[in-house]
Image (tube, helix red, strand yellow):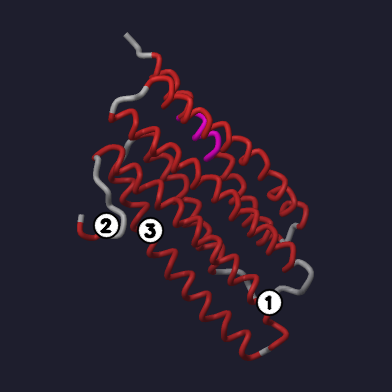
Amino acid sequence: MQRQIDLELAQLKNALLRMGSLAEQAIGLAVKALVSRDAGMAGQVVGSDEAINRLEVEIDELCLRTMARYQPEARDLRFLAMALKINNDLERMGDQAVNIAERTSDLLKEPLLKPLINIPRMADIVQRMVHDSLDAFVRRDVELARQVCRQDDEVDRYDDQLFRELLTYMMEDPKAITRAVNLILISRHLERIADHATNIAEDVVYLVQGKTIKHHLAGE
């Protein structure tokens, strides 16, 4: 016989997946706006943030209401605690997508500083991490979650490489400083999205195995 709490937990999972889909779309659109230099597309990303914020509030309320109503046992309580954390990570991803769109709007006021090669590559990895972290959550797939965690190092390497490259542009030409700083910030926003995807992946491992892997993945 199905428990009433199971229905609410399923509702919560579906809400998180809707929010994840919105966050994924915002990230993809923000990067596409940058590459295609499309101001209208960047504006769409900024406008999409309200829907993500509304859904974050709804999910928080659903989690807290379920906790208060059912006083859940350990397994269900762990899921609800994780849902609250995932909800926060997804909302932050939406914020970072807006930040990318805003930096893109600034960049469109001036000529392109350099061909965009590494940022799109970095963005591809980041978007895959977001998708896989949510897929791992749905399937309770620990190995996929760990794979997401490992990809974070690759994103960090791209971020460091871009910073060094753009620092050289700024040193060689003061007129490039504003554009270079905006590109550095976009890289940092992508790196932060990857961190949030990693948080979700780490929470999946905790949900399935009751094991915390933050800060010592290599030792697991």
Residue 197: percent from left, percent from top: 44, 50
Residue at 57% across / 31% down in the picture?
58
Q: Nearer the viewer, residue 121 or 48?
A: 48
Q: Considering depth in this image, is 209 or 134 the residue closer to the camera?
A: 209
Mark 2 lies on residue: 217
Residue closest to the eye, 35 or 191: 191
Label 1 – label 3 distance at C-alpha? 28 Å
Mark 1, other Cα within 10 Å: few <14 / some 14–19 / many ≥20: some
**Badge 1 element:** loop
Q: What residue range appears in magenta?
A: 13-20
Q: Residue furthest left?
A: 219
Is 175 on the left-hand or right-hand side of 28? Answer: right
- Residue located beneath label 3 in the image: 151
Q: Quadrant of residue 48?
A: top right
Q: Are marks 2 and 1 in contact (CB under 8 Å)?
A: no
> In the figure, 167 relative to 80: above or below?
below
Q: Earlier in the sequence, mark 3 or mark 2?
A: 3
